[in-house]
Amino acid sequence: MGLLDFLRGSGPPVSARREPRLHAEAGVSSPADNFQAGGPWVSFPMGGPSRSGVLVNERTTLSLPAVMQALRILSGVFAMVPMHYCRHDGTGTHRLTDDPLYQLMNGRPNDAQSRFAFREILMSDLLMAGNFYAYVSRDAFMQPVALTRLDPFGTLPLQSFERATGQSMFYDTTLPDGSSGRFAARDIWHVSGMSRNGLQGLSPIAYMKEAFGESIATATYVQNYWRNNGQPPVIMTSDKPIEPGARQAIKEDWQSLYSGPMNAGVPAVLGNGLKAAYMPMNNKNGQLVETRTAQVLDIARAWGVPPHLIFELSKATFGNIEQQSLEFVIYHLGPHFARVADSAMHAFAGAGCIFKHDPSDLLKGGFLDRAQGVSALRNAGVMNTDEARNNFDLNPVGGDVGSELWRPINIGVAGETPAGTESGN
């Protein structure tokens, strides 16, 4: 045994890392009727018809008004909230507004998109595909200078594991210029949604396609109902034998002459002993409206949106809407804020620094509530005049008047004698 063998120990021999073959190909993009599977490094399609018989994919799902509104409200409100780059030290948390990372996240992520547009597509990818990927452009000092969104359907995360260093990630992807390759984790910013392996998010559309399929099928039924003049199916009978070809001709003539809203009220003239009988059917008794309302609630559950935000107000009251709006920020947007901020911190933040969203504008409430809250903080000496004015986007007063903190005269530090009084009196 040589010296190197002695130092290495008697454990199993260390072999070179074996990476799987490259999966990305030039020209790969997200097909309209395919899904990101979300399984551990598996990209099998999960599209196709649902049990209701309709095709469920991103395009057909977005055709539902409730889905479009849920996506719009979640991605839009998320994009409104700033994500600050901060440093923790013994004196508190300080925003690093002059740091390039702060400008990258709150100014201009790239030359093509504004901050709002970039964040909106980030959240949309999480909600629709379960994953968001961005290529990280770096300068000569390896500092990130631009973030370019990648197609989540054209990017595949892969892992490598070594006993000495643990797990590491790399990505097979196709860049916007059409080139494909394998990239290290430092080159790809990956934000994953809810996951079962911690590495790749689950696609909500793929895993809840049956619920979406029910809504799409119901909408299709209503469209066909009105296209056919809002009438139930017609059965035409005759005492005389009718050849198969004649049956088809009679059916086509009936549809062309009497179906559709433009033919409403047109009298029908039947010959050859034909008799028309309408099937007894009533959408009210079939609870069509109740079915569609229940499906809107299912969509609200799927995206984590209070029903009133997608205009389902059948059970809303003034009291519970205010509470649900607060819960929307805390319980529904809160995990998204934490997910994106922690991912950015893991990818970009320096030692002792964090990314943190500031949803305070969403929690301000009405003007009177805000005014009373700011007044209480001002009178208690928690904030000064300029800080109070800033809550209402007013210009600072400046000087001592704006920076001084008030101290109520009837409140002092425990154990100290208030100024202007004598001990014992």
Image (spheres, grey):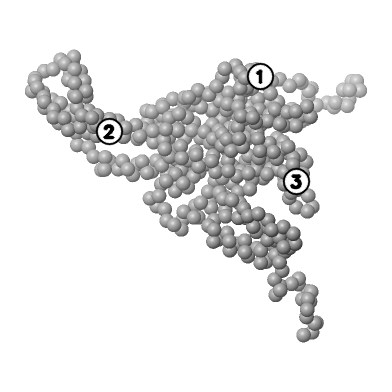
> Left or right: 407 with respect to 291?
right
- Residue type, mark 3 in image: Arg
Mark 3–mark 2 distance (CA, rounded to whole Å): 61 Å
Residue at left offset 11%, top offset 18% = 241
Report which residue position mark 1 lands on: 181
Q: Which of marks 3 and 2 is nearer the N terminus?
A: 3
- What kind of residue is marked 1? Gly
Image quarter for residue 154? top right
Whole-percent x, y for residue 45 in the image: 50, 24
**Number of other residues with Cα within 10 Å of mark 2, as a class: few under 14, some 14 to 19, many 20 or more:** few
Residue labelled with disc 2 = 226
Q: Residue at x 20, y 18 (%)?
A: 248
Q: What residue type is labelled 2?
A: Trp
Query: Which element carries disc 1, helix, strand or loop?
Result: strand
Q: Mark 3 points at which residue?
A: 87
Q: Nearer the viewer, mark 2 or mark 1?
A: 2
Could you tell me residue 207's position as x and y percent?
A: 49, 33
Are the residues flagged by discs 3 and 2 in contact, CB closer than 8 Å? no
Q: Which of marks 2 and 1 is nearer the N terminus?
A: 1
User: In the orientation shown, which residue stands out farthest toward the bottom?
Assistant: 425
Indicate whether 105 appears above or below 405: above
Residue 21 visible to the viewer: yes
Badge 3 marks a residue whose secondary structure is: strand
Whether residue 210 is visible to the viewer of this picture, yes or no, is no
